[in-house]
C-alpha cells in the first residue's frame, strides 16, 4: 500500500464532512500534504467517478458525492492499491529444492489472498462510516469490544491468519 490511499480516504471524508466545493489547497492543508499531490490523487478518484471537479477561479475545486455508497474498497480499486505485495521473490523456480522452487508461487498466492481479504473488508466501510468513527472519537482498530463495531466483528487477526495458512 502506498500513501495515495491515505490521502484519498482523508480527502473523501473531509469532502463528505464539509459538503460543497473545496479547493486542492484547502484539502492539502487539512491532509498536511501539498496541493499537487492532492490533485494527482483526486484526478484518479474523479476518473473512477468517486469525486467531481468544479472549474473556476473563485469556486474551483473538488466535491464529493454518493456519500452513502462509496466504500474504502471503491477508493482502493480507483487507486489500484495492493495492500500486500513484494517486487522481490526468494528462491529460484528452476531449483531442485522444493522450498526454493515453490516459495515465490506460495507467497504470490498468499499476497493474493491477503489483498482479497483486505478488499472484502474495505467494501464494508463507507466514507460516512469513517466520518462517524471520527465523530465518536472511536479508534476502530483498538476498540475493546469489537461487537460494537460491525466492521471489526467479522474480521479478526485469527481469521486472517487461518486463511493465510
Image (cartoon, helix red, strand yellow):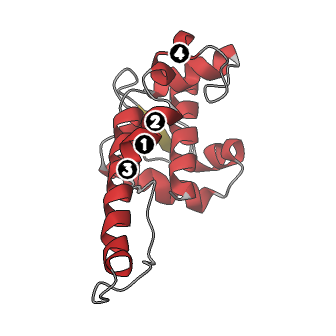
Work out whether 115 lies above or below 85: above
Q: Residue at x 37, y 50 (%)?
A: 115
Q: Residue at x 58, y 62 (%)?
A: 36
Q: CA distance from mark 2 to mark 3?
A: 29 Å
Find out whether the residues at labels 2 and 4 contact each other: C-beta distance under 8 Å: no
- Comes first in the chain, label 2 or label 4: 2
Q: Quadrant of residue 111?
A: bottom left
Q: Residues within 10 Å of mark 4 (few under 14, many from 20)?
A: some
Find out whether the residues at labels 1 and 2 contact each other: C-beta distance under 8 Å: yes
Q: Which mark is residue 63?
A: 2
Give the mark toward the camera: 1 or 2.
2
Please provide percent x and percent y for residue 74: 35, 40
Q: CA distance from mark 1 to mark 2?
A: 7 Å
Q: Residues within 10 Å of mark 3 (few under 14, many from 20)?
A: some
Q: Residues within 10 Å of mark 2 (few under 14, many from 20)?
A: many
Q: Which mark is residue 54?
A: 1
- Comes first in the chain, label 1 or label 2: 1
Q: Which mark is residue 128?
A: none
Depth check: 109 or 79 in front? 109
Q: Which residue is mark 4?
A: 149
Amino acid at each position: 500500500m502506498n500513501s495515495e490511499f491515505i490521502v484519498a480516504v482523508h480527502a473523501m471524508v473531509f469532502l463528505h464532512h464539509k459538503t460543497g466545493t473545496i479547493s486542492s489547497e484547502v484539502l492539502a492543508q487539512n491532509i498536511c500534504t501539498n496541493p499537487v499531490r492532492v490533485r494527482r490523487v483526486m484526478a484518479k478518484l474523479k476518473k473512477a467517478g468517486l469525486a467531481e471537479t468544479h472549474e473556476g477561479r473563485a469556486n474551483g475545486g473538488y466535491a464529493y458525492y454518493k456519500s452513502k455508497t462509496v466504500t474504502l474498497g471503491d477508493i482502493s480499486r480507483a487507486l489500484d492499491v495492493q495492500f500486500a505485495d513484494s517486487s522481490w521473490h526468494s528462491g529460484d523456480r528452476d531449483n531442485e529444492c522444493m522450498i526454493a522452487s515453490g516459495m515465490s508461487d506460495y507467497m504470490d498466492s498468499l499476497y493474493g489472498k491477503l489483498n482479497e481479504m483486505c478488499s472484502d473488508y474495505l467494501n464494508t466501510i463507507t466514507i460516512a462510516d469513517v466520518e462517524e468513527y471520527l465523530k465518536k472519537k472511536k479508534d476502530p482498530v483498538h476498540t475493546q469490544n469489537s461487537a460494537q463495531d460491525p466492521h471489526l466483528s467479522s474480521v479478526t487477526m485469527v481469521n486472517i491468519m487461518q486463511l493465510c495458512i
